[in-house]
Image (tube, rainbow, N blue to C red):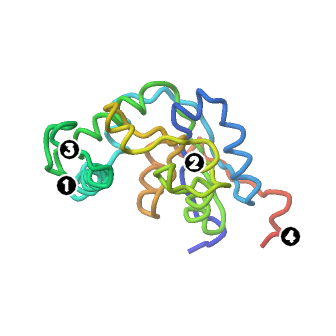
Amino acid sequence: MKLKEERTVLIVKPDGVKRGLIGEIVHRVEQRGLKVIGVKMVQADKKIIDEHLPKSQEWLASVGNKSLEDYVKNKMDPEKYVGTTDPIKIGKTIRGWLFDYWTSGPVVAVAIEGIHAIEMVRKIVGHTLPAKAEMGTIRGDFSVDSAILGNLEKRSIHNIVHASGNPQEAKNELNLWFSKKEIHSYTRAEEDIMF
């Protein structure tokens, strides 16, 4: 394994694009010493989003259970708001809202390379739930949305960015969002000093 060449994907979602945060987000990645090796703006369609979003029963249940926890925490009846307490059914509903969100405007896909790139980008973007994201992270600084508000408004959480969660996800997302000719190799000027 070439530690200096770990690759990952960061996607500026439609709300991040519409808010003019592309430059700020890329700046934070580069400031950390990570290398942008590909970047492009895309109007995502349902086909690419269907391939991007997980479909497994495990993922659907996980998403549904997170939502159920929010309803319980806020003393609200999920039956009243989403018509069920079945986590998989709730997960499928949320997956549908994600389609609407991801296709509501252009996204900017960024391929990134560097030492511990996956972990570093995840730290830069912060927790997926903006209310739990630390100040100083992209989501902590630029998003105030919450899961319960999204659920009540029957929409996805607007959390600015997506970042690959693990090496397999990063590999799949690189292949999904970029062709080989869209990935570039070069040496950053300070690489010999930083590592």
N-terminal-most mark, 1 or 4: 1
* Residue lying at 26% horizontally and 54% vertically, measured from the top left: 72
Q: SS class of the residue under badge 3? A: helix
The amino acid type, in three-letter code, at marker 4 is Ile
**Residue linked to disc 1:** 57
Q: SS class of the residue under badge 2? A: helix
**Residue closest to the eye, 39 or 57:** 57
The amino acid type, in three-letter code, at marker 2 is Arg
Counting the numbered discs, the total is 4
N-terminal-most mark, 1 or 2: 1
**Residue linked to disc 3:** 78
* Residue lying at 44% horizontally and 44% vertically, measured from the top left: 146
Query: Alpha carbon of mark 2 to alpha carbon of mark 3: how far?
Result: 26 Å
N-terminal-most mark, 1 or 3: 1
Q: Reply above or below: 1 against 136.
A: below
Q: Reply above or below: 115 against 11.
A: below
N-terminal-most mark, 2 or 4: 2
Q: Residue 130: percent from the left, percent from the top?
A: 51, 49
Query: Alpha carbon of mark 4 to alpha carbon of mark 3: how far?
Result: 54 Å
Nearer mark to the viewer, of 2 and 4: 2
Query: Alpha carbon of mark 1 to alpha carbon of mark 2: how far?
Result: 27 Å
Query: Alpha carbon of mark 2 to alpha carbon of mark 4: how far?
Result: 30 Å
**Residue linked to disc 2:** 139
Q: Residue 106: percent from the left, percent from the top?
A: 52, 27
**Residue linked to disc 4:** 193
Nearer mark to the viewer, of 1 and 4: 1
N-terminal-most mark, 4 or 3: 3
Q: Residue 88: percent from the left, percent from the top?
A: 17, 50
* Residue lying at 46% horizontally and 59% vertically, measured from the top left: 165
The amino acid type, in three-letter code, at marker 3 is Pro
Q: SS class of the residue under badge 4? A: helix
